[in-house]
């Protein structure tokens, strides 16, 4: 299977914030994943997988604040994520995983034992695109200014170790696809798909001095 390159023209918004709906739709059509999603860190009316739900996919929404007929109220951590997926009877073959928990995203992704076909994960676009850093792991983390999350390059390092290729980023979310699912991963060169926070492009000058730490894949 081949993923179209570049993906920029596919960006489009239905329920997502920054055009993620269109990118997910393009990836789904390209690799034809199982029609099951998991999203944690979501809003009842605005999130990445809501459009998949309207298309008849099965799935699981979790969020630390919202408790609705659609969303299960759960505080997701590195220690409980696999137990939660088991408790909610999430299948081993997940089509789309979306992670947006405002800071612990990279650590929770590292902890997840399942291997979704497509991963959408938030990164800190204020961090330099060439540095592999993240805010230190802490289960009760709260955002303070720009001190949160991981750089895109840190997520790319983790993704590579888990068998994924970075195929798109928009300054807020990164999109990964399992390398065994498509044949043109070589088209998606990091320097061509990395993007900083778009408006304004504020960059943290020295992440290590600011409290971030280096990350290994």
Image (cartoon, grey):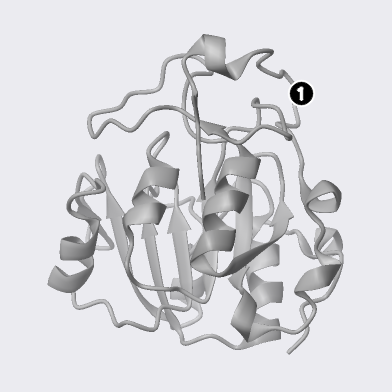
Total tally of numbered discs in the picture: 1
Q: Residue 188: x and y, percent?
A: 80, 63
Q: Quadrant of residue 65?
A: top left
Q: Around disc 1, counting alpha carbons within 10 Å, would you say few (fewer than 14), some (14 to 19), or many (20 or more)?
A: few
The residue positioned farthest toward the top in the image shown: 209
Query: Can the viewer see residue 13?
Result: yes
In the rendered view, does 119 fall on the left or right side of 58?
Answer: right
Q: Residue at x 44, y 45 (%)?
A: 106
Query: Can the viewer see residue 44?
Result: no
Q: Residue at x 23, y 29 (%)?
A: 140
Q: Residue 14: x and y, percent?
A: 62, 59
Up-down relation of residue 57 to residue 67 (above or below): below
Where disc 1 sits, the SS reads loop
Q: From the image, which quarter does the N terminus lie in?
A: bottom right
Q: Residue 11: x and y, percent?
A: 76, 59
In the rendered view, does 158 fall on the left or right side of 193?
Answer: left
Q: Residue 39: x and y, percent?
A: 39, 60
Up-down relation of residue 125 to residue 121 (above or below): above
Q: Residue at x 81, y 70 (%)?
A: 186
Up-down relation of residue 158 to residue 179 (above or below): above
Q: Residue at x 49, y 14 (%)?
A: 145
Q: Quadrant of residue 133?
A: top right
In the rendered view, does 212 fall on the left or right side of 152?
Answer: left
Which is nearer the eye, 201 or 17?
Answer: 201
- Would you name the residue on which mark 1 appears? 201
């Amino acid at each position: 299977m081949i993923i179209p390159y570049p993906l920029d023209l596919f960006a489009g918004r239905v329920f997502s914030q920054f055009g993620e709906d269109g990118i997910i739709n393009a990836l789904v059509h390209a690799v034809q994943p199982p029609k099951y999603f998991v999203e944690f860190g979501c809003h009842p009316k605005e999130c990445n997988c809501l459009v998949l739900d309207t298309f008849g996919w099965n799935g699981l929404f979790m969020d630390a604040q919202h408790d609705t007929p659609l969303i299960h109220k759960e505080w997701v951590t590195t220690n409980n994520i696999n137990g939660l997926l088991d408790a909610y009877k999430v299948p081993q073959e997940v089509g789309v995983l979306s992670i947006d928990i405002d800071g612990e995203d990279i650590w929770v992704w590292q902890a997840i034992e399942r291997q979704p076909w497509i991963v959408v994960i938030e990164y800190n676009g204020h961090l330099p695109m060439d540095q592999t850093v993240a805010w230190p792991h802490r289960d009760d983390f709260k955002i303070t200014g720009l001190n949160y999350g991981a750089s895109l390059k840190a997520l790319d390092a983790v993704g590579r170790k888990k068998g994924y290729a970075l195929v798109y980023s928009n300054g807020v979310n990164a999109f990964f696809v399992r390398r065994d699912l498509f044949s043109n991963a070589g088209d998606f060169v990091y320097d061509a798909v990395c993007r900083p926070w778009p408006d304004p492009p504020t960059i943290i000058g020295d992440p290590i001095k600011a409290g971030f730490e280096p990350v290994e894949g």
